[in-house]
Image (cartoon, helix red, strand yellow):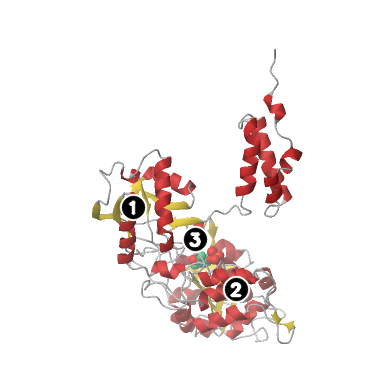
Amino acid sequence: MVEADPRRSIPRTDHLLALPEVAAARDRLGEATIRALIADAQDSARSGKLPVAEVTPTVIAAVTTRSTSSLTPVLNATGIIVHTNLGRAPLSPAAQQAVSDAAGYVDVEMDLESGKRSKRGVGAKAALLRACPAAEDALVVNNGAAALLLAVTALRGSGDAADSTSPGRSGPGTTVPDEIVVSRGELVEIGAGFRLPDLMVTTGARLREVGTTNRTHLADYAAAIGPATASLLKVHTSNFRVDGFTAEASLPELRGLADEHGLPLIADLGSGLLTPDPVLPNEPDIDTALRDGADVVIVSGDKLLGGPQAGLILGRTGAVERIARHPLARAMRTDKLTLAAIEATIAGASNPVHDALHLDPVDLRRRTDRLAEAVGGTVVVHEGRVGGGGAPGVPLPGWALELPEEFAEPLRLGDPAVVARVHQGVCLVDLRCVPETSDDALADAIRAAADRLGGTGAAADRGQGGPGITETATQTVTNDRLGEGT
Ligand SMILES: *Cc1c(COP(=O)(O)O)cnc(C)c1O
């Protein structure tokens, strides 16, 4: 006797679709999503991975818990503030509100008084110009790489002061200058294998590399300038540092040279502080770079500025206008959500990136001690990092809770998901980038991780010799990982 194959009694799609829980889920989920969840459960049962009796409860659980976004919010417990793998800057409450307000119909390109079409992005531009007094004009595009591409493309062919009618630089019989003069020490790979030099040559421009990896002088630029020169470019080496026998030409020096030859001077600052920040003395800021003579500066919106992904171009009126008028600018146009978030980030009170950067180590210590009291583990000295292409090598003094390494995975897979730092065989929980209001949720997540690992109570203390804090302030863990590139 052959028993009936139980798989033949797998609930049919019609039956599952008619379940009241599935019908109710239609308010949130699209038909295709619901059908895919049903098919998943049926397939699992067919292949024997799921008992047939579990199909209906599995489908109900799937449609009730399924979110329409596959992105999982995480608590960033790495101590790295601008973590590219974790979405860089978390938006400020003001920016989040602005994004939500702009999500529907919004007057992004209409003057409500006259009912006529208006310019896009005027609010974001005004906020940028207020924050950066040295800037005459500003343009927001999709990201820093796009901003660089656009600037080197649009400012090719003549100096900023000169327009296309100036003699000698364009017109019939003359070739359009196509060489970007840049230091060999500034040819940056920004992350995930993307290299700024590769990006720039896609515009048809040629890079005229000058100087050496460690030392480039003004004379190197001067020697390279000729009829083919399109622009001078200075790139902030945002994600690495060259120490020792080094030299570079400063922006004021390059300005002089640019003026002599009627060339535009472009500065890619990467991270983009609006104005100097005493915590990061070596990090260039937009205002100073413009005062130092750059025609345009380029920064990312989601690094030290603490806003959404965007590329900001600030500078002299003539140069920014030329960039804005270039046909490529339309292909890099930002959406209303980004414009809303940029404006609110700048106009608003503070933002999480700024707060994490300026966190008082005493406060961090107090919170870390409290966490250790709640869940066990050891409080250790731990340096935070700016990360993501900002202030390489600048340690931010602080603390972390050290747990056994095996905590890292259940923490990542928990709810809330917690991304801690795994370093030299331990799991380090750094509260710098965790909102203080989430400290209790983080403690619960650590307890849940301990439970999943099969421990009880102060499981974080396994191997640490008892509950409570073990004072090990002498133990320093340097955070030498600078994020995952930019
Ligand atoms: C980050 C960075 C970029 C790229 O900016 P995205 O906003 O990531 O596109 C370009 N140049 C420098 C120097 C950077 O640090």
Q: Which residue is mark 1?
A: 374
The disc label shown at residue 306, or none: none
The disc label shown at residue 486, or none: 3
Residue 372 placed where, x, y %?
A: 32, 53
Determine whether, in the image, residue 352 is placed left or right of residue 207: left
Q: Earlier in the sequence, mark 3 or mark 1?
A: 1
Q: Quadrant of the N terminus?
A: top right
Q: Across the whole image, how many numbered discs are drawn on residues?
A: 3
User: The residue under label 2 is which amino acid type?
Assistant: Ala
Q: Earlier in the sequence, mark 3 or mark 2?
A: 2
Q: Which residue is mark 2?
A: 340
Q: Is mark 3 within 8 Å of ligand 1?
A: yes
Residue drawn where x is 25% and y is 51% of the image: 470
Residue that protrudes farthest toward the front in the picture: 20
Residue 385 placed where, x, y %?
A: 39, 62
Residue 116 placed where, x, y %?
A: 74, 84
Q: Earlier in the sequence, mark 1 or mark 2?
A: 2
Determine whether, in the image, residue 450 is placed left or right of residue 62: left
